[in-house]
Amino acid sequence: MAEYASAQAFNQHVVLLMNAVGGATYLRFGRVETPPTENTASLVSVFDQRRSPGTAPRWLQTATLLILMGLLLALFAFRRGALARVIELPPDCALAFAFQRLAGCALDLVPFTVVAAALLGVPWQAALRELFMWAAGTDAASNRLPAANTLLWWVYSTSAYALYALIMECLTRRTVGKVLVGTHVLSESGSVPTLRQILVRNALRLLELQPPLWILGFLVVLSRNRQRVGDLFARTVVIRHAKTTERGGPAA
């Protein structure tokens, strides 16, 4: 049995505040001479829908902007020439293609996203769409955050992936994804990257994978040596083996 606590009318519509047995509160809608345009809804669910996705707090917007500006200013101050300077590679090596880098990253990252989604009970396809909308869609324009479980899923996935990449590159200079696409990491000098270089490139990898900073991924296409931010600061490149011509240079 329900008890009506209040009512409001507007433009041939009426909404009733209804207290049901057990203490639950509902909104019941009506309309003069025609069916209502809204179904009866729990008051709690109405407010939950308004909160999710939430509005990004000001500190998060400020932090994202400061990180982005800091990285760009540091690139301009310390690595400006690296964006245009051609790196001399060993004769049997060539720069990895941009699509190879993207494919290698996807092959390494996807297993972590699937496992984390299963553990957290998150539908990863829908969660990924939320992140894209936050990074470059309508949610970015309206300054709305994805759901909390989506953010938690992405943080777990990318953190595990960055740690995995750090360990694998320290041991072999390659991840499984790089092995499958035929690439590996090299220092700009042509030597094996140092531990410090690997630490720097993977620490920045974790930043680059966060949706507000996905725009930095375009540096792989724009930079002369197809380097992402982590490569530019770590002074590393990702290369592929290339057949040599008769003159000893790598084939294009």
Image (cartoon, helix red, strand yellow):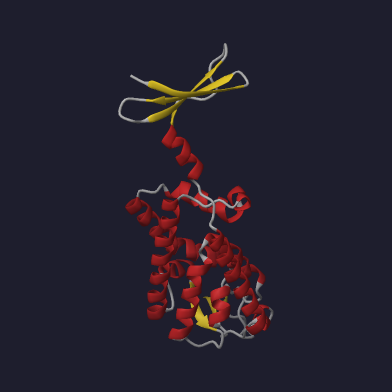
Which residue shows up at 66% across the image and 83% down it?
77
Residue at x 46% of width, y 80% of height: 198
* Residue 19 location (% of width, % of height): 38, 26
Task: Give percent across and percent down for residue 138.
Answer: 61, 48
Q: Which part of the image, by quadrant, shows the N terminus?
A: top left
What is the residue that sits farthest to the top in this orientation?
33
Going 35% across and 48% down the picture, which residue do you hit? 121
Tell me if residue 79 comes above or below residue 113 in the rendering: below
Pinpoint residue 68: horizontal percent, then vertical percent.
Answer: 60, 69
| x, y percent for residue 88 | 62, 85
Asked whether the viewer can see residue 160, the reply is yes
Q: In the rendered image of this protein, does residue 61 appear above or below residue 242?
A: above
Above or below for 147 versus 195 = above
Q: Do we see residue 241 in this rendering? A: no
Q: Would you place residue 4 above or below residue 184 in this image?
A: above
**Left or right of residue 188: residue 119:** left
Q: Which quadrant of the view contains residue 170?
A: bottom left
